[in-house]
Amino acid sequence: MSTPRRWADELALGTRLAFTGGRAALARTLLTAVGVGLGVAMLLLASSVPVLKHHRDDRIHALRDLLNASADAPRTPHSLLMTDLGTTYHGREVRGRAVQPDGPGAVLPPGLSHYPAPGELAVSPALAELLTSPDGRLLAERIGPHPVTARIAPAGLVGPGDYSFYLGSDRLAQDPAAVRLDHFGEQDPPKPLEPVLLLLSIVGVVILLTPVGVFVAAAARFGGEARDRRLAALRLVGADRAAIRRIAAGESLAGALLGLAVGGVFFLAGGQLLELVTVEGLSVFASDLTPQPALAALALAAVPLLAVTVTLAAMRRINAEPLAVTRAGAARRQRWFAVRLALPLLGGFLLYRNQADLADLGRASGLAPLIAGLLLLLLGTTALLPAVLGTTARLLGRAGPVSWQLAVRRIQWAPQAASRPIGGIVVAVSGAIALQALLGGIATDLTPLRPAATGAPVLSATSLAGGASAASYASRLRGTPGVLDATGYQEFYVQDGGTTSLAVRVSDCAGLRIFAKVPDCRDGDLFTSPDALARLGTRPALSALWPGGAMPAWRPPVPRGSADALAHPVLPTLLDRGPALYATWGALPPEVVRQQDARVLVHVDRRAPDAVEQIRTTMAGIDPHIHFYDPAAAFTDKTFLGIRRALTAGVAATLTLIAASMLVGLVAQLRERRRSLAVLAAFGTRRRTLGAALLWQVLLPVVLGLALAVGAGAGLASVLLRSAGLPVVLDWGQAGVMAAAGLGAVLALTALSLPVLRRATRAAGLRHE
């Protein structure tokens, strides 16, 4: 009869065997510890996310500056003048400020110990490195030839990879864009996530952590077949089947407990390396990677429990008799296949059944079915793989070269062991396909111009300084490398004395023809859209509505004719959607033209090297406060951008874990089979044949697994897109890239394992205890 004392003794015996059962047992334990440690490090990283987010939010709030400012704020001993010099460089945001203290007691920006002198720079470490490298030449030219005299401390940065600078100045009092402030930082009230972004966050967390659990479970079974044979010998000395299962669980528990310590070391070492990595502009300080105690305790407790549970479940399919091991028969395999097939079907049903309840995600009633459905679908896909693999191997294993036969027979004998190392790849690829589809759908919804504008050969620049000359801007831009043509224009609204407003676009004759179909034109002409022609028949007095409210009225000239607006899908304007006037420069009073923002439409040769950056640099020399709109660049809200960056970094970390874990799994399998491989080599089998057999043995499960992953990912993406109310459009090219990346990683790792195969086929491997 089993008692708690007997259970404890048998678990302890298994733990001792893991460390004292000879070099082979110790090697298996160490491999298990390394595999589990990789998973533990990932779980500790995931449990650090709440603390990391809290620290990043604190830094973001502490850096708030321009939103606290006002153009007419009073000057005090603690105030300063500031203007925005921020820009974008190769898709990365560069945060820049020009500062001028009003007195010696002016409040300091976070990260600075003193203000830079006029004409001097204080820069972040990452920006300092970029400015001194060849890649940062255009940015250094854009910022200007100012000496760098100080570094911004971590308190003034959101992450170690941030690009940030402060430029000292003594001329901001004459800058119309400068504002005054007397404090930094502001704590904004927390805003609840929109339901679609909450869905994205939940899906991302589940998809990123599920492969970790799959691999930890697989790592607990490293060396399982050799251990099964050794445990069968224990039956010879009187241990019953229940005792054998508990002793096996003890061996797994030893590897898992050692893996907790190894995972802690990996986490601490990886935290230092993370400071050197920036993903989509997201970087983190190692000091912010502090696991949240409750989540860390839950993750660390789950790992040994998972190892014991997986081992006990695996041993139930094994009959360990004295000096013999048998596995479940075909009937039992068929029964288990039905159970495995039910898992993804049930997961898909739960997701489909609850797809219309986005508003319930904030409550447990809506959250539980979503998480349960995701887990069942992802884990069920992995659970199906051994059955599909075994059936395929039986169908394909009747002919072929020796290497193919060796691989297929191995898969037929142990499909579970063959599919175990790639279970994480299956989950990761299927989840990544679904996640990328959801990210793409949300991005398209948030940026409706993005699909039509991608790769468009235009961008626009707007100067907010009054009195600027759009024509002069365009003329100076035409000589910039990468610029095919530049058109200066203005656009604003006018009112005809009533409640109706008219849109006005002003340019030269060539510029007007870009925006509308106009007849013969010369300077001083005015054209109208058909729906505005009747209103101007009486030549009412018009007044511009911007800037600063209505301006003095003026009477337009007699329209020369009607102009039909041309559709311009990439131009950032709403003026083409109503009554509009198309005027040449001479048709408007000079005081009206001087008060409007200057705009330039730039036609770009995007094949030219750094064309957009060249244009930004030229415009910065004209007006450092220029505002750019590049329709070929994604533009979306910052909340979605932050979630996308975090998930992209998480996917990169997960795939790195899976790649490392697969290499550990392949090494474990080769060590386990070293005697049989040495026997084959001793009978004359060429190492090239054995290497090809290893490749086939890995390639067949991977191809089948990726096929399952693409199908599961596409199905999951369809359900999630419907849940978010987005059109179901799957990017099969992206899915192919994901599958190809998984396949490429497997081939590379197989190549890395060949030295281990070479050592395993030496004559020394024939020795057997």
Image: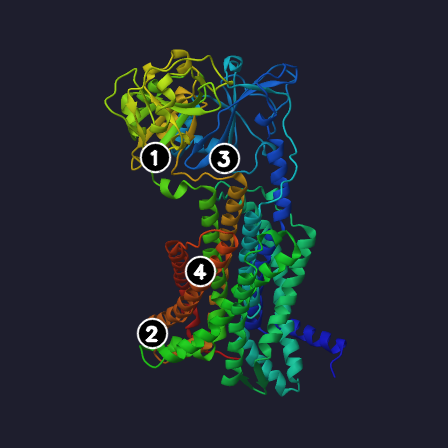
Give the label, 1 or 3, closer to the camera: 1
Q: Where is residue 353 drawn, in percent x and y?
A: 55, 62
Where residue 485 appears, as percent x and y from the top left, is 28, 27
| Marks 1 and 3, the one that precedes in the sequence | 3
The structure residue drawn at horizontal position 60% and vertical position 50%, both measured from the top left corner, is 268
User: 10 Å neighbourhood of mark 4: few (<14), some, or many (≥20)?
Assistant: many
* Label at residue 686: 2
Which of the two discs, 3 and 4, labels the residue nearer the N terminus? 3
Q: Name the residue carrying label 4.
A: 714
> Hey, what amino acid is under mark 1?
His
Question: Mark 3 = which residue?
Answer: 126
Up the image or down, 715 lies above or below 314; here it is above
SS of the residue under disc 2: loop
Crowding around mark 3 (Cα neighbors within 10 Å: few <14, some 14 to 19, many 20+) is some
N-term-proximal mark, 2 vs 1? 1
Residue type, mark 4 in image: Ala
Mark 3: amino acid: Ala
**Label 3 to label 4: alpha-carbon separation:** 39 Å
Q: Which of 241 and 602 is in front in this view?
A: 602
For residue 440, above or below residue 529:
below
Q: Is mark 1 on a helix, strand or loop?
A: loop
User: Helix, strand or loop at disc 4?
Assistant: helix
Say if residue 65 shows up in the picture. Answer: yes
